[in-house]
Amino acid sequence: EVQLVESGGGLVQAGGSLKLSCAVSGFTFDDYAIGWFRQAPGKEREGVSCFNNGDRSTYYVNSVKGRFTLSSDNAKNTVYLQMDSLKPEDTAVYYCAVTKGPYNSRTGDGMDYWGKGTLVTVSK
């Protein structure tokens, strides 16, 4: 059974930092893609950052470029999202997801497995 468990969310002031973690189990890290997505209240889900192991490429949505960094520790089967210079508009539930097939990095459509999410709240 594939499981993804996010952690690291919380309340932070604007300009602060958080580091999210996503522990993945039951999933073989071969030819996979893994990503972080978020959904703010009243808004649609959007892709924040995705990593494609096939071509070793990383995608970042424009609004987080230069502020967020996706990384991984394959030995721990864990993916991280370092979030710096946080803004109130980053407030959302953040989810990680994985797939071995095609997917839409902007929406998350096609991702096969999802975590339950972790809430990030950025105050002014």
Image: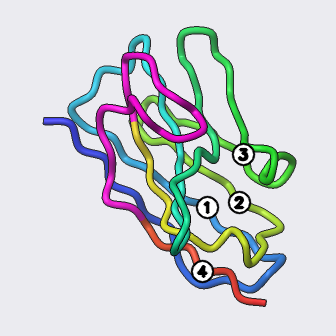
Q: Amino acid at mark 4?
A: Thr
- Which mark's residue is nearer the viewer, 4 or 2? 4
Q: Circle 2: is it few (<14), some (14-19), or many (20+) Cα within 10 Å? A: many
Real-space CA distance between mark 3 and mark 4, rounded to the nearest whole angstrom: 18 Å
- Going from the N terminus, do you reach mark 4 or mark 2 first? 2
Real-space CA distance between mark 1 and mark 3, rounded to the nearest whole angstrom: 9 Å
Question: Label 4: which residue?
Answer: 121
Q: Can you tell which quarter of the image residue 60 is in?
A: top right
Whether the residues at callouts 3 and 2 have beta carbons within 8 Å, the answer is no
Whether the residues at callouts 2 and 1 have beta carbons within 8 Å, the answer is yes
Q: Which label sits on residue 19?
A: 1
Residue at 51% of width from left, 35% of height from top?
73
Q: Circle 3: is it few (<14), some (14-19), or many (20+) Cα within 10 Å? A: some
Side (left or right) of 66 relative to 46: right
Overall secondary structure of the magenta section: loop
User: According to the image, what is the colour scheme of the structure?
Assistant: rainbow
- Going from the N terminus, do you reach mark 3 or mark 2 first? 3
- Front-most of residues 108 and 85: 108
Q: Which segment is the magenta one?
A: 98-117
Tell me: residue 33, above or below residue 85.
Answer: above
Whether the residues at callouts 3 and 4 have beta carbons within 8 Å, the answer is no
- Going from the N terminus, do you reach mark 3 or mark 4 first? 3
Real-space CA distance between mark 4 and mark 2, rounded to the nearest whole angstrom: 12 Å
Q: Circle 1: is it few (<14), some (14-19), or many (20+) Cα within 10 Å? A: some
- Going from the N terminus, do you reach mark 1 or mark 3 first? 1
The spot of residue 28 in percent (x, y) is 30, 20
- Quarter occupied by the N terminus: top left
The spot of residue 58 in percent (x, y) is 68, 28
Q: Which label sits on residue 83?
A: 2
Tell me: residue 117, above or below residue 89.
Answer: above
